[in-house]
Image (cartoon, coloured by chain):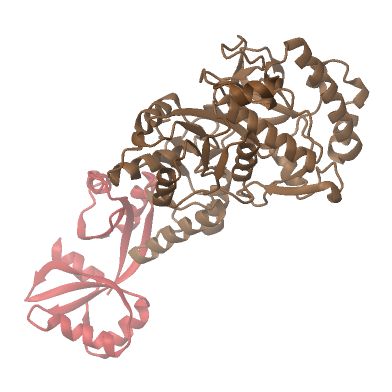
Chain colours: A brown, B red
Amino acid sequence: MLKERWNDVEGGFHPASAPDYLPEEKLREVQLRRLRVVVKRAYDNVELIRTRMQEKGMAPEDIKQLSDVAHLPFTTKLDLRDTYPFGLFASPMSDIVRLHASSGTTGKPIVVAYTREDLEVWAEVMTRTFASCGLHRGDVVQNAFGYGLFTGGLGAHYGAESLGATVIPVSGGNTERQLMVMKDFSVTAMCATPSYFTHIIERAHDMGMDMRDLPLHTGIFGAEPWSDAMRAHIEEGAGIKAYDIYGLSEIIGPGVASECAEQNGLHVFEDHFYPEIIDPETGEPLPDGEEGELVLTTLSKQAMPIIRYRTRDITRIIPETCACGRTTRRFRRVGRRSDDMFIIRGVNVFPSQVEAALLQVEGTLPHYQIILTRENGLDQMAVEVEVTPEVFSDKVRALEDVRAALAKAIEHIVGIRVGLRLVEPRTIARSEGKAKRVIDNRSL
Amino acid sequence: MKLQQLSVFLENRPGHLAEPLELLSRQGINLLNLSLADTAEFGILRIIVRDWQKAEQVLKDAGWVVKLTEVVAVDVEDRPGGLAEVLQAAGRAELKIEYMYAFPLRRNDRAALIFRFEQPDRAIEQLQSAGIHLIEAEELFAAVE
């Protein structure tokens, strides 16, 4: 029946979207059943999780109701790094059909594995993502997310194919070609980071091209935080509807949550990912509606089940049911994080990486500050470093060399070109307690 | 002949040159000479004062990054070719000059030049053996005060 609606009715939903409309009682039942399976799978196959559960005196059988999830140990990004590369795998390599990795900006990358079933789930949640953003069979999707180890490109690719849309795998970059493809192939939907798409709009404008004349009607944006102001700018500039999607490679990649036509919060694909909001300080669960850190547990993943992953993203669950009819819970779009990590051009950067680079060059850690701005739609990162007596010289050339060495060391570790400015001592504001390392001036 | 030069790191922003200079003036420290090396983003203020130990302390206490460098004061005739002779002698001795600046002081038709050599001691030895006159610090300070 669903399939018929999908095929025949404009605006109908894809059959894969059925779980988004489950009655709540049924959804909780599915979640509990899957949670019990995934916890057992993790306990039986992943040493780290087994040890941590044993330390808490827990066995998989102790999961009797959904709220018992709160007794399970957390998993952090550090755990994924410490167990690099295969330490969290719960499937033998012979069952693993795909590996992805995070950008590896903190030294070692984080490896994520997928069994064939995991890939099917991934394609399904991405299908539901696109359907939720109003795409159909017949849409032509230009995918400007990067293809490769990054989960964005292939995640969106298989989802759009599975939806029945036509996919154009352009990957990122080459803006003029992006515009040419958009125009020549009558592209109707675009996947990109919001900052890159802003850049595309500006380039189009420079080329004397009005994107509003194109058949493009929808933009699917993710991989970095953005705001309603930026959405308005994009929607106005390109004449499209712009949707926010959410995901992270540790959990699956894109496809963890998505906005719907209401553009008011992101629906979690709750039958596959169990969301909790916790107090980032105490780790205690918070009721729906209260702001805290988003914690996710995978409910169906085989190759790499993740229990209570601390995303560091600060948001809150919206308790009200959504006007779109979906019964899955939504969270507010993520605006800030509980740790000091920031995302620039889709790359995760920690100030600690910048510190490592500065230490490498200077020997001691100078005071520094990272300033993020957005110029012509592209994120820019500048680092201000206070000059120390150790590196100061009466020779201009020597100081220029220091400046260049610092910039190079940071670029090497972070993988992004940075502007580096030497500043006078004590010019960077000191704060009591934790230093404010990142000044984010990107108008989100 | 050898002088202690203080270098101070400055950001290239309006008003920044005044701050360390005012600091020294409040301590009654008189500048014998000053030069400024600048790029688009930062500058290096180089100064020569009699009481360089005190100046260094005052600046450091106020949080400025200060570096002490030995420079050489060379005495040249204030006439066409005066500087060229010194440079030729330095070139013959293969002395590496990091930078130099002229001195406003004039007495008996002679000018003083401040050189920052890679190896100041070797420079002094070579220049003297080439017959170039180097000025003692005391002589310079006495001439202006």
Q: Residue A317 at what x, y percent from top left?
A: 62, 16
Residue beneath the point at 17% across and 66% down: B142
- Is the C terminus of chain B in the top left, top right, bottom left or bottom right quadrant? bottom left
Residue beneath the point at 20% across and 73% down: B113
Of residues A127 and A335, the one nearer the viewer is A127
- Is residue A255 at all visible to an observer of this figure? no
Q: Residue B82 at what x, y percent from top left?
A: 13, 82
- Is residue A181 at all visible to an observer of this figure? yes
Of residues A28 and B111, the one nearer the viewer is A28
The answer to whether B60 appears left or right of B34 in the picture is right
Quarter where residue B47 is shown: bottom left
Query: Total marks drawn?
Result: 0
Q: Residue A52 at what x, y percent from top left?
A: 85, 33
Relative to residue A158, is residue A359 depicted above or below? below
Q: Residue B64 at what x, y percent from top left?
A: 36, 48
Of residues A419 and A174, the one nearer the viewer is A174
Quarter where residue A151 is shown: top right
The answer to whether A324 appears left or right of B12 in the picture is right
Quarter where residue B99 is shown: bottom left
